[in-house]
Image (cartoon, grey):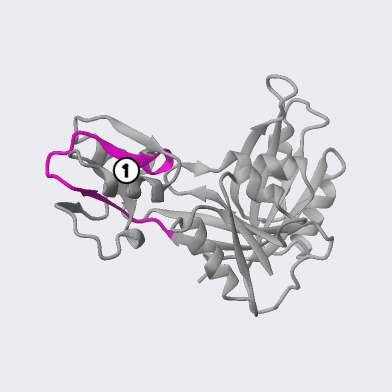
């Protein structure tokens, strides 16, 4: 099984892809430099793509959700990966800090303590390499799992703004119309898109009332611009349960009377206990 994910090696995406791969009999990883390329690799270059969809601090990953509107993909699994960063330096008074731009946003409180420029890098691995190659006082924000056996003059562990920072990843494949088989002892989550093709006053309220009437618990609701005109949006929704559940089927039947619904898949809920 060929799994595409965001590279280079050492990323949280690699951790998520490997965790998903361990559920398979055999797999190979293929790294791509951007999320768009990861998703585009399915199905010709890869069978499955593992991509981030939401972070506790940064929120949803918009390019992934927008791709669902444009391409026939389905979600078959989700994984929650803890995100822990350390700030490491070759000197106690660094003159600059290397940080991947997402890592910078998730560690902003720590970085604000240093009155030095932050140099954005394409990846966390690049931030570490630039620090190791630097002959000037410098620091880098690095995932804790990448620290290895390196010796640094200064190390500050767990510098994320939120102590329990996590990123949620999803495994997606080409839409096949046959969802993950439902098991009675598994708690599921369902993802779907409501396409804004008949906009009218009260549209979103109507949909929320339908879900409430059938007691379907929504866990995520994100509006994304259609790219056609101001004020026009698609809605990405996640809810508890499998799309074959009676309540969800009934709710979607009513919603489909007014708008197009794209079912993105039902899959085991990684957060269920």
Placement of 242 over or under 107, stated as above or below: below
Placement of 118 over or under 18, stated as above or below: above
- Residue 84: x percent and y percent? 34, 56
- Residue 225: x percent and y percent? 67, 29
Q: Is residue 217 magenta?
A: no
Residue 271 versus residue 70: which sits nearer the camera? 70
Which quarter of the image is occupied by the N terminus?
Answer: bottom right
- Residue 234: x percent and y percent? 71, 35
Write down the quadrant of residue 100 in the picture. Answer: top left
Residue 9 versus residue 100: which sits nearer the camera? 9
* Residue found at x 78% / y 26%: 200
* Residue found at x 83% / y 47%: 254
Placement of 180 over or under 98, stated as above or below: below
Residue 158 versus residue 210: which sits nearer the camera? 158
Outermost top residue:
230
Task: Name the secondary structure under disc 1.
Answer: loop
Residue topped by disc 1: 107
How many residues crowd around disc 1 within 10 Å: few (fewer than 14), some, or many (20 or more)? Answer: many
Outermost right residue:
257
Give the residues drawn in magenta, as a range: 82-103
Q: Is residue 192 left or right of residue 170?
A: right
């Amino acid at each position: 099984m060929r799994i595409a994910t965001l590279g280079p090696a050492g990323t949280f995406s690699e951790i998520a892809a490997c965790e998903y791969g361990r559920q398979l009999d055999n797999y190979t990883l293929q790294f791509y430099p951007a999320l768009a390329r990861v998703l585009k690799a399915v199905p010709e270059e890869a069978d499955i793509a593992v991509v981030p969809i939401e972070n506790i601090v940064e929120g949803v990953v918009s390019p992934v959700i927008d791709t669902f509107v444009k391409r026939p993909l389905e979600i078959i699994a989700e994984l929650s990966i803890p995100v822990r960063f350390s700030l490491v330096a070759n000197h106690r008074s660094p003159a600059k800090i290397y940080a991947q731009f997402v890592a910078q946003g998730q560690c902003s409180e720590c970085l604000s303590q240093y009155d030095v420029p932050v140099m954005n890098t394409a990846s966390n691995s690049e931030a570490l390499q630039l620090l190791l190659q630097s002959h000037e006082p410098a620091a880098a924000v690095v995932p804790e799992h990448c620290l290895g056996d390196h010796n640094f003059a200064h190390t500050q562990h767990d510098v994320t703004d939120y102590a329990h920072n996590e990123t949620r990843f999803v495994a997606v494949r080409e839409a096949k119309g046959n969802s993950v088989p439902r098991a009675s002892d598994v708690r599921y989550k369902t993802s779907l898109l409501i396409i804004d093709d008949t906009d009218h006053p009260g549209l979103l309220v109507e949909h929320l009332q339908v879900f409430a009437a059938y007691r379907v618990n929504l866990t995520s609701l994100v509006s994304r611009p259609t790219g056609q005109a101001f004020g026009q949006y698609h809605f990405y929704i996640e809810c508890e349960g499998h799309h074959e559940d009676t309540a969800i089927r009934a709710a979607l039947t009513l919603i489909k009377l007014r708008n197009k619904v794209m079912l993105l898949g039902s899959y085991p809920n990684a957060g269920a206990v």
